[in-house]
């Protein structure tokens, strides 16, 4: 499902930033796909931590094939050696179990998050072992579809900015923030198109 603000954001960003507008025009008809399952999105984000999109997709396919379904109870019940055989590190197995336990102990949490602001959601999520700011940002983009999330520590986003805006040369964090000011209040959309300019398939969590 496409976020309700997507077309408005495309027009806004195209007017504000000609270079970004050119990138947007190259992916006509494509958009952020929002998933309807909070646990699925968070589990996929944990698996994607600190590895490439391609590697994460490979591990995720094995993980998805190993479990009967992607639920907190199935992860808790799963054999640890079987999870490790999917390509998961011991730490990521622990993080997935911590996430599963959190969902089992908080059965209404998906609905609760819908009512929180971005800062409250980040605080809630980062209380779970293995979830840091980046994973919380992926969740706010791919599950909650918040329009103005800017995951500045994301390596893919940084690479796309360096390539498109600075001839492959690095920029300081301050410069990146300055560049992104023009994209407010739709930095989620700008981020998605910058990711898209880098990867052969749309990023998904």
Image (cartoon, rainbow, N blue to C red):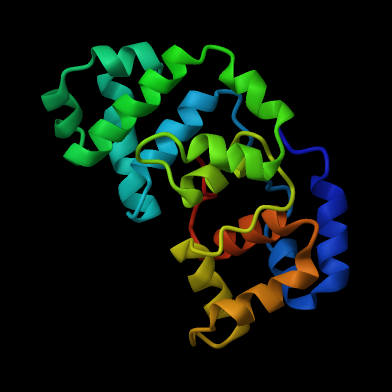
Tell me if 203 is positioned left or right of 16 in this view. Answer: left
Q: Which of the two residues, 190 or 24, is positioned nearer the viewer here?
A: 190
In percent of width and height, residue 24 lies at 72, 62
Based on the displayed image, in which of its 4 quarters is residue 72 positioned?
top left
| Depicted 108 relative to depicted 198: above or below | above
Tell me if 101 is positioned left or right of 192 in this view. Answer: left
Tell me if 199 is positioned left or right of 142 in this view. Answer: left
Tell me if 122 is positioned left or right of 147 in this view. Answer: left
In percent of width and height, residue 94 lies at 25, 32
At 42% from the left and 34% from the top, the residue drawn is: 128
At 62% from the left and 82% from the top, the residue drawn is: 175
Residue 69 visible in the picture: no
Residue 103 visible in the picture: yes
| Depicted 68 relative to depicted 14: above or below | above
In percent of width and height, residue 132 lies at 44, 47
At 54% from the left and 71% from the top, the residue drawn is: 160
| Depicted 203 relative to depicted 106: above or below | below
Q: Which of the two residues, 62 or 76, is positioned nearer the viewer here?
A: 76
At 34% from the left and 45% from the top, the residue drawn is: 56
In percent of width and height, residue 190 lies at 69, 61
Image mark count: 0
Residue found at the very far left of the displayed protein? 81
Quadrant holding the N terminus? top right
């Amino acid at each position: 499902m496409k976020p309700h603000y997507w077309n408005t954001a495309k027009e806004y960003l195209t007017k504000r930033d000609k270079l970004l507008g050119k990138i947007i025009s190259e992916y006509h008809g494509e958009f952020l796909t929002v998933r309807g399952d909070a646990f699925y999105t968070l589990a996929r984000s944990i698996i994607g931590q600190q590895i490439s999109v391609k590697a994460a997709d490979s591990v995720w396919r094995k993980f998805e094939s190993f479990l009967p379904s992607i639920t907190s109870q199935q992860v808790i019940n799963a054999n640890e050696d079987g999870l490790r055989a999917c390509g998961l590190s011991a730490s990521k197995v622990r993080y997935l179990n911590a996430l599963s336990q959190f969902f089992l102990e908080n059965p209404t949490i998906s609905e609760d998050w819908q009512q929180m602001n971005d800062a409250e959601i980040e605080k809630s999520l980062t209380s779970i072992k293995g979830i840091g700011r980046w994973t919380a940002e992926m969740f706010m983009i791919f599950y909650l579809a918040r329009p103005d999330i800017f995951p500045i520590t994301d390596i893919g986003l940084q690479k796309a900015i360096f390539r498109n805006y600075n001839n492959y040369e690095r920029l300081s964090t301050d410069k990146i923030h300055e560049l992104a000011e023009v994209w407010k209040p739709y930095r989620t959309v700008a981020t998605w198109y910058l990711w898209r300019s880098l990867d052969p398939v749309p990023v998904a969590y």
